[in-house]
Amino acid sequence: MKRVTTLLAILGFVFICMESCYYDVEEELYPSTNCDTLNVSYANTVFSILETQCLNCHNNANSGILGAGIDLEGYTQLKTYVDNGKFLSSITHDGNASFMPKSANNRKLPDCDIAQITAWINAGAPNN
């Protein structure tokens, strides 16, 4: 009987420990106060965000399979979705387009990325 009680206590402890695990999001733990929205360019800022957050699915090769036919690879392709408002709508989750990036909990891009893309679009989305 003592062995069963010990085993149940150990299993209970392990269960409690496992239930307390969660995944931290670095940006929530250490919010950045350094978000440069003045020196934003397609080449140095926007493309970098696209490359890490969007182009796995929305590139020439995968857009038909994973990206719902939306190809964001290259300035010209992106500009189409910027001009019709779908790109900004998708990343801000305003309800006028599919939420992007896709995730189990509909997590948005980091606030700084959204602010930089918004600043670039508000500046006329120049190709530089």
Image: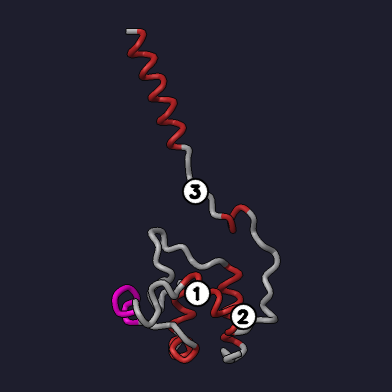
Q: Is residue 75 above or below residue 54?
A: below
> Which residue corresponds to the image point at 61% horizontal and 90% vertical from the top-left?
128
What's the residue type where badge 2 is placed?
Asn
Q: CA distance from mark 2 to mark 1?
A: 11 Å
In this view, which residue lies farthest toward the top? 1
Looking at the image, residue 76 sits to the left or right of residue 11; the answer is right
> Which residue corresponds to the image point at 30% horizontal and 79% vertical from the top-left?
64
Q: Which residue is mark 2?
A: 44
Q: Which residue is mark 3?
A: 23
Asked if the residue at tag 1 contacts the one at tag 3, i.e. Cβ–Cβ closer than 8 Å, the answer is no
SS state under label 3: loop
What's the residue type where badge 3 is placed?
Tyr
SS state under label 2: helix
Q: Residues within 10 Å of mark 3 (few under 14, many from 20)?
A: few
What's the residue type where badge 1 is placed?
Glu
Looking at the image, residue 30 sits to the left or right of residue 86; the answer is right
Asked if the residue at tag 2 contacts the one at tag 3, i.e. Cβ–Cβ closer than 8 Å, the answer is no
Q: Which residues are magenta?
A: 63-69
The x, y position of residue 75, in whole percent, is: 50, 88
